[in-house]
Image (cartoon, rainbow, N blue to C red):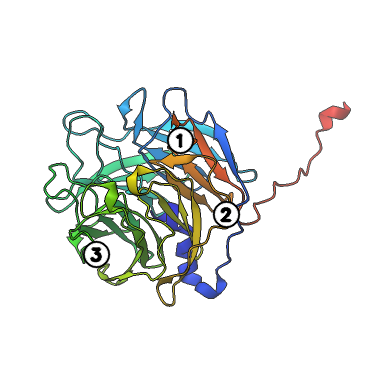
């Protein structure tokens, strides 16, 4: 949503659209298997890329059910594969001892050193989380330094909502469904400043989510988003009621005030997605937005990869194109992140279907795209192995 989904967009916002290099067309996706210990393959979690590693947080697996675990997967920058997986300190349970970190796919974002999770839900009876979780990563070791929480304003406790971080340093949480079902879906947008130490200041509310209608109603469910500079680019997913019949192809751009963090407008884009989608993923790489996977009206699974160009000078999204290699399977509850080091996209913690009606289950795998830019070249050996000559 998101330095995992906006790290390069952040740099692009500083440089201006004139200097934004267009990512190469994705020519292939590689499935890397056995990335988790057996039994811990995950879905419904959140993920980000921090430094040289992919971090997968929470979600649901066959061993724990809903889980509080954090996995760190080190990425080889030269060839792009995951070369090592480590389990880090777990996140705290709810007061009743359960996890409450499921359905956080689009609610997990990072500044590149601190990870933020907006709320969280469950697959067994408990309560949604009514706070943001802050996970600070040690810049030297990549381990977890601390985990704290900051409460939302009452009575916001989202799951299957969205989150974003803008260049000016504000954290946003919006949409999702409520634990009580009153309202069934939130049109709420809450935001907080990110303090110099990575903590969050107090939350406040700003311009509510727009209603794409019909039918009339409010709230977004399974939205997906990314940020470029101080713009939030978001698709509502499902709107107004908890029914996939209400999934939509609309895209909105939120303009934010960099001085205050307030959203000044939600602007409906003229260029709609090629089809209605929910639970897809937006990821920004420079000024290019990728839209990947998800489902459409009726719950039909998708393996789509679309791209469009964002113009930060006008705040508009261009036409969507299907020029990249499509996913090798249909994906649900997934995340997609871009690694500035390996120059590749990573789709992780997902359930797969192929063909559309065949449930392959939660995958012990990561899908890795072909490079979007020239990857780094391994350093040349400068010293010979003299023992060969002894």
Q: Which residue is mark 3?
A: 210
Hey, which residue is sitting farthest bottom in the picture? 314
Labelled disc at residue 215: none
Question: Which mark is in front, 2 or 1?
Answer: 1
Q: Which residue is mark 2?
A: 324
Question: Which mark is in front, 1 or 3?
Answer: 1
Residue shown at 45% from the left, 63% from the top? 10
Q: Is residue 363 left or right of residue 382?
A: left
Query: Badge 3: few (under 14), some or many (20 or more) residues near its Cα, within 10 Å?
Result: some
Q: Count up the numbered dots.
A: 3
- The x and y percentages for residue 57 are 37, 38
Sequence-earlier tag: 3 or 2: 3
Quadrant of res 56: top left
Mark 1 and mark 3: Cα distance apart in space: 32 Å
Query: Badge 1: few (under 14), some or many (20 or more) residues near its Cα, within 10 Å?
Result: many
Mark 2 and mark 1: Cα distance apart in space: 20 Å
Q: Which residue is mark 1?
A: 353
Quadrant of res 148: top left
Against 70, is 211 above or below?
Answer: below
């Amino acid at each position: 949503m998101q330095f995992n989904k906006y790290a390069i967009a952040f740099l692009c916002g500083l440089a201006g659209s004139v200097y934004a290099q267009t990512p190469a067309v994705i020519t292939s996706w590689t499935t890397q298997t056995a990335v988790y210990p057996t039994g811990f393959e995950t879905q419904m979690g959140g993920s980000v890329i921090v430094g040289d590693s992919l971090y997968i947080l929470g979600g649901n697996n066959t061993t724990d059910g809903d889980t509080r675990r954090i996995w760190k997967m080190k990425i080889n920058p030269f060839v792009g594969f995951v070369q090592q997986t480590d389990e880090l300190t777990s996140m705290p349970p709810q007061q009743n001892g359960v996890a409450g970190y499921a359905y956080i796919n689009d609610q997990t974002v990072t500044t590149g050193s601190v990870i933020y999770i907006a709320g969280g839900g469950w697959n067994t009876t408990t309560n949604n989380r009514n706070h943001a979780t802050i996970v600070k990563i040690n810049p030297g070791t990549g381990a977890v330094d601390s985990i704290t929480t900051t409460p939302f304003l009452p009575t916001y406790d989202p799951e299957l909502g969205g989150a974003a971080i803008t260049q000016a340093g504000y954290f946003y949480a919006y949409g999702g469904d409520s634990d009580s079902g009153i309202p069934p879906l939130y049109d709420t947008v809450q935001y907080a400043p990110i303090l110099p130490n990575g903590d969050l200041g107090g939350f406040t509310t700003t311009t509510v989510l727009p209603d794409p209608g019909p039918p009339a109603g409010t709230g977004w469910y399974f939205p997906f988003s990314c940020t470029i500079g101080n713009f939030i680019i978001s698709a509502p997913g499902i709107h107004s009621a908890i029914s996939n019949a209400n999934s939509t192809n609309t895209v909105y751009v939120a303009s934010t005030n960099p001085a205050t963090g307030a959203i000044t407008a939600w602007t409906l884009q003229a260029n709609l997605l090629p089809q209605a989608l929910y639970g897809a993923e937006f990821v920004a790489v420079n000024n290019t937005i990728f839209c990947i996977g998800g489902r459409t009206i009726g719950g039909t699974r998708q393996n789509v990869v679309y791209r469009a160009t964002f113009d930060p000078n006008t705040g508009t999204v261009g036409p969507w194109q299907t020029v990249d290699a499509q996913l090798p399977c249909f994906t649900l509850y997934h995340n997609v992140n871009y690694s500035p080091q390996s120059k590749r996209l990573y789709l992780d913690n997902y359930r797969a279907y192929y063909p559309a009606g065949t449930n392959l289950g939660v995958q012990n795998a990561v899908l890795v795209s072909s490079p979007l830019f020239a990857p780094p070249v391994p350093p040349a050996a400068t010293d010979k192995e003299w023992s060969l000559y002894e």
